[in-house]
Image (cartoon, rainbow, N blue to C red):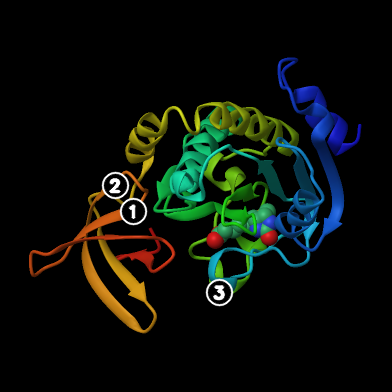
């Protein structure tokens, strides 16, 4: 059975977007391709999954390694009816939905490293890149949720420069992983999230705080060349990280301006 067929077979009969899903052998980036489709009018619920990407990317132009046969490279198109500023929590809501999907399909619940990485055992398993498309008037045209999941890699499959901090679902679960089941669980969980995205913002952020392993940790905040140390206290209503500094000051930082590393490792 083809991968597409395996995924379709794993979806529940209630999943409403079965006819809006494409599985493609190789793409530059599922996010970039879905952006083109979105501009051509593709509907809410369109999903692209690639077996490999040649130009997978994350925030700040970082690349996301996307070899064939071991990962899930996934993008979902949403068209929420709201202003762009109402979607500050989109990445947080996606991270929670992904924890639900992985708990259901891989048998363990990862933690969330603020803002957009899922981790287990101190290693990154999954990255999330959400991107908004605006109308010429500055309204929201579409939102793209891009997710890369390392599923079946062994430690030696990662290049030496990321080997200490990269992990996979198989490494974390201690068993092989059925990518079709994980992909189907992602589609179902993200569909459920899309239904409450605007109406249950407080609840989604409360769930995010429960899964976020950054809260309570000593962290390094990197902003350009500047590195500051502090303690992460909370995640605010916009998804910003509330940090206490040694001089007693508090600041809420957004993921666009800083990146965060644990003081004693990646998480
Ligand atoms: C990150 O780690 O900062 C985010 C990585 C997001 C990677 C996914 S893979 C599918 C989609 N297509 C991309 O080019 N990026 C996202």
Image depth: mark 3 or mark 2 in front: 2
Is the distance from the Cβ of mark 1 to the nearest ligand 1 atom less than 8 Å?
no
- Alpha-carbon distance for marks 1 and 3? 29 Å
Few, some or many residues within 10 Å of mark 1 (<14, 14–19, 20+): many
- Alpha-carbon distance for marks 2 and 1? 5 Å
Callout 2 touching callout 1 (CB < 8 Å)? yes
Q: Quadrant of the N terminus?
A: top right
- Most extreme residue toward the top is 13
Residue 144 image position (x, y, % from top left): 64, 49
Callout 3 touching callout 2 (CB < 8 Å)? no
Query: Considering only vertical position in the picture, is 174 above or below 242?
Result: above
Q: On the rendering, which quadrant does ligand 1 occupy? A: bottom right
Query: Considering only vertical position in the picture, is 6 above or below 238?
Result: above
Residue 239 image position (x, y, % from top left): 37, 49
Residue 54 image position (x, y, % from top left): 78, 66
Q: Which numbered tag is attached to residue 240?
A: 1
Query: Mark 2 highlights which residue?
Result: 236
SS of the residue under disc 3: helix
- Most extreme residue toward the left is 248
Specify which label sits upstream in the sequence, 1 or 3: 3
Residue ID at (37%, 29%): 203
Residue ID at (8%, 70%): 247
Specify which label sits upstream in the sequence, 3 or 2: 3
Q: Is residue 175 visible?
A: yes
Residue ID at (79%, 45%): 41
- Alpha-carbon distance for marks 3 and 2? 33 Å
- Most extreme residue toward the bottom is 225
Query: Mark 3 highlights which residue?
Result: 161
Q: Which numbered tag is attached to residue 137?
A: none
SS of the residue under disc 1: loop
Residue ID at (22%, 50%): 216
Q: Quadrant of the C terminus?
A: bottom left
């Amino acid at each position: 059975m083809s991968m597409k067929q395996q995924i379709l077979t794993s979806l529940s009969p209630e999943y409403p977007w079965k006819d809006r899903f494409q599985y493609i052998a190789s793409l530059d980036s599922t996010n970039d391709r879905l952006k083109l489709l979105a501009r051509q009018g593709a509907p809410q619920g369109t999903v692209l999954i690639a077996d490999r990407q040649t130009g997978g990317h994350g925030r700040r132009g970082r690349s996301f390694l996307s070899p064939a046969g071991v990962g899930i490279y996934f993008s979902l198109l949403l068209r929420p009816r709201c202003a762009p500023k109402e979607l500050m929590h989109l990445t947080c809501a996606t991270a929670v939905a992904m924890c639900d999907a992985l708990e259901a399909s891989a048998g363990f619940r990862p933690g969330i490293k603020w803002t957009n990485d899922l981790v287990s055992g101190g290693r990154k398993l999954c990255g999330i890149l959400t991107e908004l498309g605006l109308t010429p008037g500055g309204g929201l045209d579409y939102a793209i949720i891009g997710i890369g999941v390392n599923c079946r890699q062994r430690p030696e499959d990662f290049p030496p420069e990321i080997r200490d901090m990269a992990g996979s679902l198989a490494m974390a679960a201690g068993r092989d992983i059925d990518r079709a089941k994980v992909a189907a669980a992602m589609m179902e969980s993200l569909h459920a999230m899309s239904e409450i995205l605007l109406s249950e913002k407080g609840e989604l952020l409360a769930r995010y705080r429960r899964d976020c392993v950054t809260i309570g940790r000593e962290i390094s905040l990197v902003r350009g060349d500047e590195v500051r140390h502090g303690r992460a206290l909370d995640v605010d209503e916009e998804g910003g990280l509330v940090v206490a500094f040694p001089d007693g000051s508090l600041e809420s930082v957004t993921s666009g301006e800083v990146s965060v590393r644990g003081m004693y490792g990646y998480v």
